C-alpha cells in the first residue's frame, strides 16, 4: 500500500459512493478497501455521513455549513 494509492482512493470515494465510476475503477477501489484499514474507515465514515445528512435534511434546504457540522459530530462520536 502506498500513500499515493490511498490518496487516489480517498479522492474517488465520493464518486464511488455515487456509483459513477467505471467498472475498472470500482474494482480497483474495492480491492484497495479490502486491503487498507485506513481507507475502509474513510469509506464507512463518508457513507455514514451521507446517511446522516439524508436523515437530518428530509427535503428541507440544506444550510451551507451543515456538512461541516455533521462531520464534526460524527468525528466526536467515533473518536
Image (cartoon, rainbow, N blue to C red):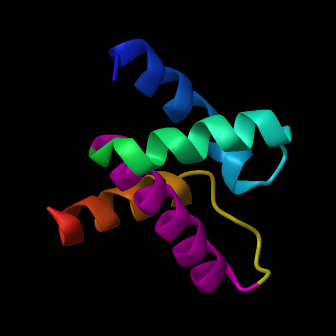
- State the residue at coordinates (50%, 34%): 10
Position of residue 43 measured from the top left corner of the image (x, y, whole percent): 47, 53
User: Is 58 placed above or below 63 here?
Assistant: below
Residue span colored magenta:
38-58
- State the residue at coordinates (50%, 65%): 49
Comparing 25 with 42, the one in front is 25
Picture quadrant of residue 79? bottom left
- Look at the image and say whether residue 65 sits in the magenta stretch: no
User: Is 20 placed above or below 45 here?
Assistant: above
- State the residue at coordinates (66%, 77%): 54
Q: Is residue 12 left or right of residue 76?
A: right
Comparing 66 with 35, the one in front is 35
Magenta: main secondary structure equals helix
- State the residue at coordinates (69%, 65%): 62
Comparing 79 with 30, the one in front is 30
Q: Is residue 26 left or right of residue 28?
A: right
Position of residue 13 measured from the top left corner of the image (x, y, whole percent): 59, 42
Amino acid at each position: 500500500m502506498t500513500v499515493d494509492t490511498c490518496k487516489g482512493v480517498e479522492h474517488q470515494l465520493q464518486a464511488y459512493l455515487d456509483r459513477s465510476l467505471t467498472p475498472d475503477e470500482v474494482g480497483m477501489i474495492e480491492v484497495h478497501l479490502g486491503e487498507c484499514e485506513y481507507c475502509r474507515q474513510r469509506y464507512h465514515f463518508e457513507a455514514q455521513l451521507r446517511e446522516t445528512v439524508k436523515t437530518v435534511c428530509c427535503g428541507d434546504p440544506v444550510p451551507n455549513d451543515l456538512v461541516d457540522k455533521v462531520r464534526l459530530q460524527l468525528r466526536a462520536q467515533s473518536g
